[in-house]
Amino acid sequence: MAMAIAYVWIKEDLYDKEYVRTHTVGFDKWKAYLLGEEDGIAKTPEWQEKETGVPAKDVRALAREWARSASISHRAAGAMATAALAATRPASNGRASWCA
């Protein structure tokens, strides 16, 4: 579900690009993964609905609500930064850590 929320933020331009630019490494690679450019599977709210059963409309609404909250948006940008950094580090199986 977190990937679908980040997908909405990216597609709808709801994230703090300056924060991500100054606090992340590998964000573009992670963004490409979320958008499906790496594996052909965009991590959309509809994609996560099949995985989790949580309605896509609810995930979109949550993503938009969180994006409107300054304190949550800043923490979320930090979470995106952490995920982007993790995406550049290999897991023990040799794959990117978000694929582990």
Image: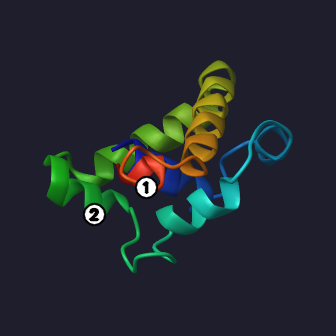
* Residue 36 image offset from top left, x and y in percent: 45, 73
Q: Amino acid at mark 1?
A: Gly
* Residue 99 image offset from top left, x and y in percent: 38, 54
Disc 1 + disc 2, Cβ < 8 Å: no
Q: Earlier in the sequence, mark 1 or mark 2?
A: 2
- Name the residue: 80% across, 37% down: 19
- Name the residue: 50% across, 65% down: 33
Compared with 3, 83 (above or below) is above
Tell me: 41 left or right of 96. left
Q: Which residue is mark 1?
A: 94
Residue 47 — which label? 2
Tell me: 58 left or right of 92. left
Label 2 neighbour load within 10 Å: few <14, some 14-19, many 20+: some
* Residue 29 image offset from top left, x and y in percent: 62, 63
Secondary structure of the residue carrying numbered label 2: helix
Compared with 65, 100 (above or below) is below
